[in-house]
Image: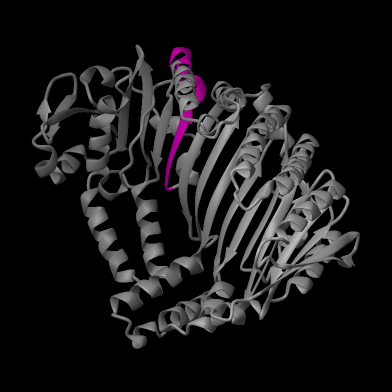
Amino acid sequence: MKLFPKLWAPALALALLAAPLAAVWAQTVKPVAVVSIASVKENLADVAYLSGIAGMADAGKSAMFFGNAFTAGIDKTRPIGLYVVPEAGDFHGVAFVPVSDLKVLLEVHKETIGTPKDVGNNILEIGAMGRTAFIKEQAGWAFVAESKEHLAGLPQDPVALLGDLPKKYNVAGKILVQNIPQELRRMAIDELKLGVERALNNAPGAQNNVNPDEVKKALQTQLASIEKLISESEEVTIGLGINAETKSSYLDFSFTARAGTSLAQQMASQVGTKTNFAGFLLPEASVTLNFVSVASKDDIAQVAAALKMYRATADKRLDDIPELTPEQRGPAKAAVGQMFDVIEKTIAAGKIEGGAALVLLPKSISFAAGGGVADGAAFETALKSLLELGKSQPDFPKVEYNVGTQGDLKLHRLTATTPNGEPEARELLGEKLEILIAIGPKTVLVTGGKDAAALLKKIVERSAAEASKPVPPLQLNVALIPILKFYKSVDNNPIVAGVLSSLEQSGGDRISLTSQATPLSSTGRLEVQEGIIKAAGEAAKAFGAGFNPNALIVKP
């Protein structure tokens, strides 16, 4: 396949005609892929919005001026797009640009694309960098392709190929998997299989004397999962959006399964997920994580194959630790094996859930992590075995069992003295670093830091109060204000102080990564709130001013 050479011409023309609003990809009348660029008017308005909140309104005005100049002749109210179609084992792409006056547009870019030449049938030939492309105007659209033949049978309404992408995103691309010819999908799968065979020669099992059959089974299981994804997917979409109304910018990645497939069933199983670990979602925390996943039979089989390989690798590495005596090596392998048993039983139960939290306060760090397990008692037995082996090692933390309870959780404590030579660590973590391990019938939680006990209590109580809380399958949240307050407490950098002041006035200090599920689709979204962009602008101005404190004054 010569995909990229075939797409250079429409992509180049789209880049030249849309100027700073360019993007590249491909599709057909029954396209295998599309690229969507929202209207020039909308994109320039969003440029003005972003530059305004970043405190760079003048730069935004300049961008709008040049953007309008470079897109003269384009209808600025309609989207720009590109579609790719398969043809005899190959692909070709056609870009389409809404035009109000094609002659003006071509004249604006004359120095770059050369003088258009009429080659008949209402088609113009343009040249750029020793290459040529062809343009045909039809029903208010300028279609661009790498050859004249691809400008036949053009769609009357090309925007219909883009669906709702122009409304949802500033720039987006979509692959319509089922429109890709079966032989090309088969070719991709065969290439994956060939790659697996090559990987087997350099796999960890070959290097660490692990049974190569186990490595092969694990890789083949993963390959089967990828093959299913290719065969049963309907669409894959990635899009970048800017929304002045919600005061946020976001990047989405989503894929949709074909109805009636096992992949669709797997998608549907993630709808309406609930967690028993909502306590990790502390509003005052700097970072929070919560996850819930319902494992399918294929997921369980894939993880089981991987765990079998990792278990063998762990045994081999224990053999290679010189500090372990022959008397210790057997119990160590048994304890690690018990840990793997608990993990495998947890995966086999069909639900994986848990979370984490990082709490940063002025001159204070606390952290927590944990989740559900199938057999807390077995985990506790394995943990105690490992801790007993660790006691023989120099500088190993002090171990105390059964130091208390929290609900149905039994508490064990590890205490390590913070090194005297690290005053910053002693100030942030305390003279002694305390780690609490809380184990219940179906739960394992670990907290540590300056306020480990209070953090554990808060998480357990909140989780109990919000048991079976509906949540998305994944949510990771980062709050910048508490992070900057913590940083300021240990280093009063004037730039940090200025950024913090900006955020405290404007709010919107969150960065989040979430996953949302529907009966046929899964969408991951990375979202940045407006205050982050404003703070970044303040920091950029401060750096540009050469650390001048006066540049950090935040204007109301």
Q: Position of residue 348 (x, y in %)?
A: 78, 34
Q: Position of residue 208 (x, y in %)?
A: 54, 35
| Left or right: 101 in relation to 289 | left
Task: Tell me which residue sits at (38%, 41%) in the image.
Answer: 79
Task: Tell me which residue sits at (85%, 45%) in the image.
Answer: 375
Is residue 469 visible in the rendered image? The answer is: no
- Range of residues picked out in magenta: 170-186
Q: Residue reaching furthest right?
A: 408
Q: Residue reaching furthest bottom?
A: 550
Q: Which is nearer the eye, 240 or 442?
A: 442
- Give the answer, above or below, for where 432 lies relative to 527: below
Q: Which is nearer the eye, 543 or 318?
A: 318
Magenta segment includes 138:
no
Task: Tell me which residue sits at (36%, 36%) in the image.
Answer: 81
Q: Which is nearer the eye, 408 or 286?
A: 408
Count of numbered badges drawn on the protein:
0
Name the quarter where the N terminus is drawn: top left
